[in-house]
Image (cartoon, rainbow, N blue to C red):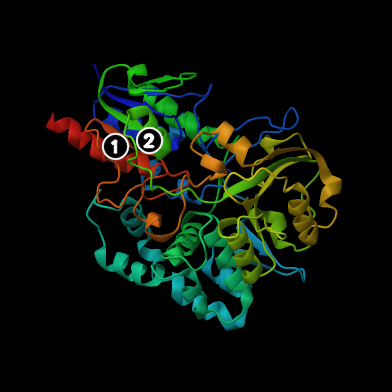
Amino acid sequence: MLDAVVVGAGPNGLTAAVELARRGFSVAVFEARGTVGGGARTEELTLPGFRHDPCSAAHPLGINSPAFRALPLERYGLEWLHAGLPMAHPFPDGSAAVLSRSVGETAASFGARDAGAYRRLVEPFLPRWDTLARDFMSLPLTALPRDPVTLARFGLAGLPPSTWLMRRFRDDKAKTLFAGLVAHVMAPLGGFATGAIGLVFALAAHARGWPVARGGSQGISDALAAYLKDLGGTVHTDYEVKRLDDLPPARAYVFDTSPTALARIAGLGNHYADYRYGPGVFKIDYALDGPVPWTAQEPRTAGTVQIGADSAEIGAALHAAARQGRAPDAPFLITVQPSVADPTRAPEGKHVFWAYGHVPNGWTGDLTDAIERQLERFAPGFRDRVLARATAGPPELAARNANYVGGDIASGAVSGLQLLLRPKLSLFPYATPHPAVFICSSATPPGPGVHGMSGHNAAKAVWRRLRQT
């Protein structure tokens, strides 16, 4: 009998398996798709030689993850590559704000009236960032805070809505860039604890940047899988699990799946019936004949580029997708240009690029024209560079990855108490009513992102249980 079986080979499932195998437990992973990866995969979606990341591409939380940093993933081929700037946010007048490794450069891009306010916001946390990140991403009750004072100060700044935090700024450049940071997890700008989301992304950039993985995000998943195999674990692909009886006998079963799928497979009935899924996204992967022709200089060297004319436009786009049930006319876009940092992603002189906008959960329309109209506002002539495009709305995203219910790449609405207490209002979110069944997906704290911390935290709950039996 195995000690643990993990269902789902995304970053969280693989991290949970590695953490258990490192402690001497026998572990097997079962994945429905033909390759490991989940939200960290790389495929040729458009043309031969163009390597695209179907979901995540830039990894501020990955390079800063306490779980990943404790593992020898570089030995297994993971290499982080950095663009000249982690992120840029262009404006219609041809200027741009930036999120740089340098706090000073970032503050200066906001203008003189907000530079000091930004410094005062982030600089107190940077010297203690590694401890803060560990405390913040280990909640709840998986570990006692190592620096409770700094965590409490962070909570005072971050627990209110981001709209409150943005009152520190006088001009819209800083407000717009910060609103875009919050929108990365599709959270409403006025929601509980959304200030913390923006702060985490900003601090992550200043601490270690927003890199891409050489060769594609698949490199993260492949490194985890290779390390797991060296630890004695096994990985089985093309193995769809429909019920617990499909799996070999084990002392514990750990699910890197949506709560909905877990309840169905494990026979938990309506246990997660109240779990809410958030807006979906419409994503386009591009093969380009050259770099994106940004009007502003700064985005040309940035790995990630946010697209929204001002904070009001970003807020309206999020509200349309989440509250009004319609696709926004001017979508807020998150775009990533991996080949700026990693030329191996495309043939010489060519580029890969992706963009997505928020749409209602389960939306079946086509946002291509709206996305490209937005891109043309800030990069005139963009369409002329397009060699091929691969589009994916909510139905296609959910078909590629069953955890993206209705196209929700955050694996659950990031709003209200569900931002912190997910998938249930519980101090033990990784446990389920079945004593041998656990959940480790992005539907558990600390939530969405390629960081492995949900798997790391869940593994702690599992090995404590295994040691008791």
> Label 1, on which residue?
459
Question: Circle 1 sits in a helix, a strand or a loop, which is it?
Answer: helix
| Nearer the observer, 331 or 228 | 331
The residue under label 1 is which amino acid type?
Ala
Q: Residue at x 83, y 57 (%)?
A: 380
The residue under label 2 is which amino acid type?
Thr
Compared with residue 421, is residue 269 higher up or lower down, i.e. above or below?
above
Mark positioned earlier in the residue sequence (1 or 2): 2
Left or right of residue 100, residue 67 in this image: left
Compared with residue 419, is residue 290 higher up or lower down, i.e. above or below?
above
Question: Circle 2 sits in a helix, a strand or a loop, which is it?
Answer: helix
Contact (CB < 8 A) between labels 1 and 2?
yes
> Label 2, on which residue?
15
| Nearer the observer, 236 or 439 | 439
Give the percent coordinates (x, y) of residue 414: 46, 55
Compared with residue 239, is residue 430 higher up or lower down, i.e. above or below?
below
Give the percent coordinates (x, y) of residue 264: 39, 31
Quadrant hosting residue 466: top left
Give the percent coordinates (x, y) of residue 330: 71, 60
Q: Is residue 138 visible?
A: yes
Q: Residue at x 30, y 35 (%)?
A: 438
Compared with residue 422, is residue 173 higher up or lower down, i.e. above or below?
below
Left or right of residue 327, residue 207 in this image: left
Q: Quadrant of the C terminus?
A: top left
Give the percent coordinates (x, y) of residue 457: 31, 43
Left or right of residue 301, residue 206 in this image: left
